Image (cartoon, helix red, strand yellow):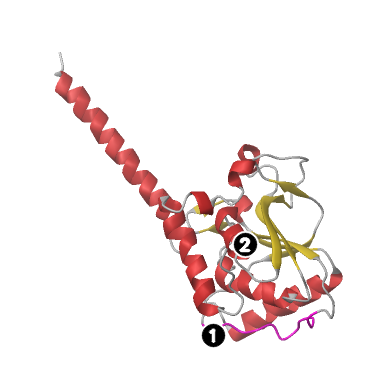
Amino acid sequence: MRSPLFGRGLAIALIVAFGAWTAVRSIGARPVEPKFPFPKPAADSPLAPAQGEEKVVLAGGCFWGVQAVFGHLKGVSSAVSGYAGGHVESPGYSSVGTGLTGHAESVSVTFDPSQISFGQILMVYFSVAHDPTQLNRQGPDSGSQYRSAIFYTSEEQKRIATAYVEQLNTAKSYPGKIVTQIAPFTAFYRAEEYHQDYLQSHMDQPYIVYNDLPKLEHLKKQFPELYRQN
């Protein structure tokens, strides 16, 4: 008969191994950082003469960090985590996580074009919010639900986004080619409430500390004129 100590030791070893795997999974590989100063978009709309409201849906990996970045951006009135780009109505986190619904974890960004231009929104998106050279993954997360995508809501947004990708690739702002999908907006489904403003209530979570808090620091450092302290 095996000693009870053997079973206890095995259980402890499994717990330690699982903890180590979880830590590695949370950390993963840090995305590639671009060259700074980051180019401003050559093709951009001027600031609107009067206050207004414009929307765009952006995908760039796990929506926790992307939402936090745009929630700290001047001129942005709303940043909501959700799902876009799929073929199933009213998806949830579990179904999207399988990669079978076609959705990407996304953030619906509402902004005032008299305070911040669409090009400036994209400048932060491409340089701070995520690494646009990673195909169907972002840091430790992999799958098409973590793809880089811009779901534009107007032909003007499409024009600016397309021109900016070409500009950044020509300038070699990243070591690799930008793989961001540029597609028309069709539908956006708000994510479950526990995902909204997730970073604010999980500041000490290893995943947040390693993957997302640095994004806010980069935003504050690289674009202090656009950073807003909440």
Residue 49 left/right relative to 91: right
Work out whether 142 lies above or below 96.
Answer: below
Amino acid of disc 2: Gly
Whole-percent x and y of residue 205?
42, 50
Whole-percent x and y of residue 132?
59, 68
Q: Earlier in the sequence, mark 2 or mark 1?
A: 1
Work out whether 39 lies above or below 9.
Answer: below
Residue 177 visible? The answer is no
Marker disc for residue 37: 1
Q: Secondary structure at mark 2?
A: helix
Amino acid of disc 1: Pro
Local crowd size for mark 1, using a 10 Å CA cut-off: few (<14), some (14–19), many (≥20):
few
Which image quarter is the C terminus in? bottom right
Residue at horizontal 15 percent and vertical 23 percent from the top: 5
Residue 158 left/right relative to 36: right
Q: Main secondary structure of the magenta part?
A: loop
Question: Is 15 colored magenta in this rendering?
Answer: no
Rendering quarter of residue 22: top left
Task: Give whichever of 71, 151 is nearer the camera.
Answer: 71
In space, the residues marked 2 and 1 are separated at their CA atoms by: 22 Å
Whole-percent x and y of residue 117?
74, 76
Q: Which residue in the protein does label 2 denote?
A: 71
Rendering quarter of residue 183: bottom right
Task: Give whichever of 17, 57 is nearer the camera.
Answer: 57
Residues in magenta, as a range? 36-47
Q: Residue furthest top?
A: 1
Work out whether 125 lies above or below 222.
Answer: above
